Image (spheres, helix red, strand yellow):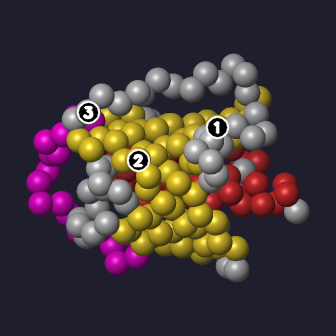
Amino acid sequence: MKGYRLKVIVVAMAALVLASCGAKKGLVKPTQDTPTWHTCMIQGARATVSKGDDKLSANVTMQTVRDSMIVISVMPMLGIEMLRLEATPEQLTAIDKIHGQYAVTTFEQLNNKLTPKLTWKVLQQMCSAELPTGSQQAHLQYMFGKEMIDIVIDYSTPIKDVPVRMTNQRTDRYTKIDISRWL
């Protein structure tokens, strides 16, 4: 049962990143084409992921360097990072710190399983709280294969143009696995 729960957490939190493209009412174009900020940090956000009767919640910290990199730290308990997602415009890296594993994939590979498709632009909007709804909460839905996953993100106030620590996590201490094991 513990293995199943961790797999659900890993898939659900990966879905947090992936589902950013599936806003329930659809995304509206933002009022400005180019954001005026360079870096953005959101600490203390809360993500709740539901799949059928399973429901998981975790604190999330999102750090963004515009058009360059996004780091999402998932901390289900006591502020301990258990899952880290790193994204660039070309690829995503998911690091499961509990099991000492990581996987790397491209947006194209992920989009083979997702409905709707994931784009860097929408992911960046989600991780900087710039979804055009303007609210402090985002409700996202997405189909992963034949399963519906609902995600609710309660944002804290984004802090713009502050120094963010954007170093890639060293993966040499983790075992690389094929992403299909988690998907």
Residue 74 image offset from top left, x and y in percent? 57, 48
Residue at left 14%, top 51%?
33
Give the residue type at disc 1. Ile
Lower sequence index among marks 2 and 3? 2
Instruction: Identify the residue position indicated by label 2 in the image.
Output: 43
Labels 2 & 1 near each other (Cβ < 8 A) = no
Pick the front one: 120 or 128? 128
Q: Which corner quadrant of the image does residue 49 belong to?
A: bottom right
Callout 3: helix, strand or loop?
loop
Q: How many marks?
A: 3
Callout 2: helix, strand or loop?
strand
Instruction: Identify the residue position indicated by label 1 in the image.
Output: 95
Give the residue type at disc 2. Gln
Give the residue type at disc 3. Val
Task: Say whether residue 97 is visible.
Answer: yes
Range drawn in magenta: 22-39
What distance separates the C-alpha of mark 1 from that of mark 3? 25 Å
Residue at left 44%, top 64%?
153
Lower sequence index among marks 1 and 3? 1
Callout 1: helix, strand or loop?
strand
Q: Classify 10 Å Cα crowding around label 3: few (below 14), some (14-19), many (20 and above).
A: few
Residue 169 image offset from top left, x and y in percent? 57, 26
Instruction: Identify the residue position indicated by label 3 in the image.
Output: 162
Picture layout, residue 62 above or below residue 88: below
Residue at left 82%, top 60%?
4
**In the drawing, does residue 64 fall left or right of residue 37?**
right
Pick the front one: 148 or 55? 55
Residue sitting farthest toward the front: 78
Picture layout, residue 96 above or below residue 21: above
Question: In front: mark 2 or mark 1?
Answer: 2
Residue sitting farthest toward the right: 1
What distance separates the C-alpha of mark 2 from that of mark 3? 12 Å
